[in-house]
Image (cartoon, rainbow, N blue to C red):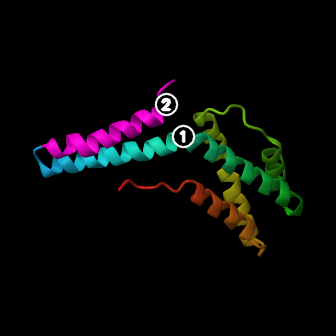
Amino acid sequence: MKPEADQILMFSAIKLASEYAPQIPTQYGQGMAQVVAALMFMSAQEYDRAADIRASENADMRALFKLLAPQIADAGLRRDLETAASAREESLRVSALNASNEHLRKILIRLHAHLDETGTDTRPVWDVLKAMAARRTLTLPG
């Protein structure tokens, strides 16, 4: 599709914020238009990178699971780590990536709790979490 959705959202956000919001008679209305414009701006950023972020996060979690699974004494958790580590994305649709991401995050939480309970170093989990947060950072307009 030309133009792409991110370009349409960005153009609309700029128009709304710079041309239409100032013409709204109430401060509340102007403020709400600015909020909507900011949400559109952030949605435009997310559109372009959404699949990449989720695929990268999923790959990072799977790599961590593969690395740590052999060290896990809990058979059920180890099996879940190995299964998750060997799985691949069924689709690159954001909804499918989100579903995988949610499933993997639940396993990551279990892994983190297990490592913490057994006194094992949790830094590898924190490294993955920090990378995930950095990827999802948005730049606000203005």
Dominant secondary structure (helix, strand or loop) of the stretch shown in magenta:
helix
Q: Secondary structure at mark 1?
A: helix
Q: Nearer the viewer, residue 1 or 59?
A: 1
Q: Nearer the viewer, residue 61 or 141?
A: 141
Tally the numbered discs. 2
Look at the image and tell me whether residue 102 can be seen: no
Look at the image and tell me whether residue 103 can be seen: yes
Residue carrying label 2: 4
Q: Position of residue 9 (x, y in %)?
A: 40, 37
Residue drawn at (57%, 42%) of the image: 50
Residue situated furthest right in the rendering? 70
Magenta range is 1-24
Three-letter amino acid code at the position of disc 2 = Glu
Residue drawn at (21%, 40%) of the image: 20
Q: Nearer the viewer, residue 142 or 100?
A: 142
Residue 73, relative to residue 136: is it above or below?
below
